[in-house]
Amino acid sequence: MTGVKGRMPTVEPHLPMLMGMVFGRLRERLAEDLPELRASQLRLLEWLPPEGLTISELAERVEMTTQGCGQFVRQLADLGMVEVAVPDHDARARLVRITDRGGDAVARAGALLRACDEAWADQVGAERYRVFREVLREVALG
């Protein structure tokens, strides 16, 4: 996770800039450990319950357009991470369910993210990191 190390902006880093740097480091780690999956694709997998969702429902949950979500679903289906079926209640809809391969990718990503949490807690101290996460959760979730 060294992509932004040694580089500093010419202005005092603001919160979105700092968050972007952290996300950049996470994307680098995901690319190393899960090269078949982009962070944006992982985001969709993480929102899929075992019973599945229609593409429209999934798009609403991840705050995407239905068309954009459909493109991601096609990519994930091509990778074997999801399966797409026609639900009994609506022949026009497409039901998206995570596959074992997709579930494995989510589990591997979860382990990677826990390792990042542990590394950052070691870097700044467990209590400071706990408070940081607590405050960030409050800000993010309102």
Image (tube, rainbow, N blue to C red):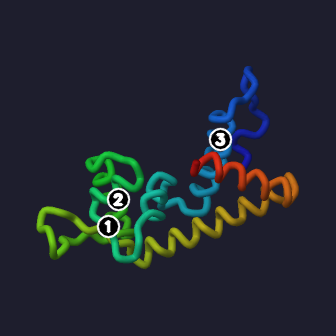
Identify the mark nearer the N-term, 2 or 1.
Answer: 1
Residue 123 in view of the camera: no
Q: Which residue lies furthest to the top in this view?
A: 10
38 or 132, which lies in front? 132
Say left or right for 110 vs 81.
right
Callout 2: helix, strand or loop?
helix
Q: Where is residue 136 in the image (x, y as percent from the top left)?
A: 68, 49
Name the residue that disc number 2 marks.
58
Q: Given contact means CB atoms under 8 Å apart, are the residues at marks 2 and 1 in contact? A: yes
Q: Which amino acid, by three-letter code, is at mark 1?
A: Leu
Neighbourhood count class around disc 3 (C-alpha, 10 Å): few under 14, some 14–19, many 20 upward: few
- What whole-number distance in Å separates the C-alpha atoms at marks 3 and 1? 30 Å
The residue sitting at 35% across, 53% down in the picture is 60
| Residue under pointer 1 | 53
Give the residue type at disc 3.
Met
Residue 51, how many percent across, how many down? 35, 76
Q: Which residue is pictured at 15% across the width and 72% down the height?
A: 89
For label 3, the SS is helix
Mark nearest the camera among 3 and 1 is 1
Q: What element carries label 1?
A: strand
State whether residue 23 appears in this view. yes
Calculate the distance from the C-alpha at mark 2 to the C-alpha at mark 1.
6 Å
43 lies above or below 140:
below
Q: Which amino acid does label 2 sit on?
A: Leu
Mark 2 or mark 3: whose residue is earlier in sequence: 3
> For mark 3, what is the residue?
19
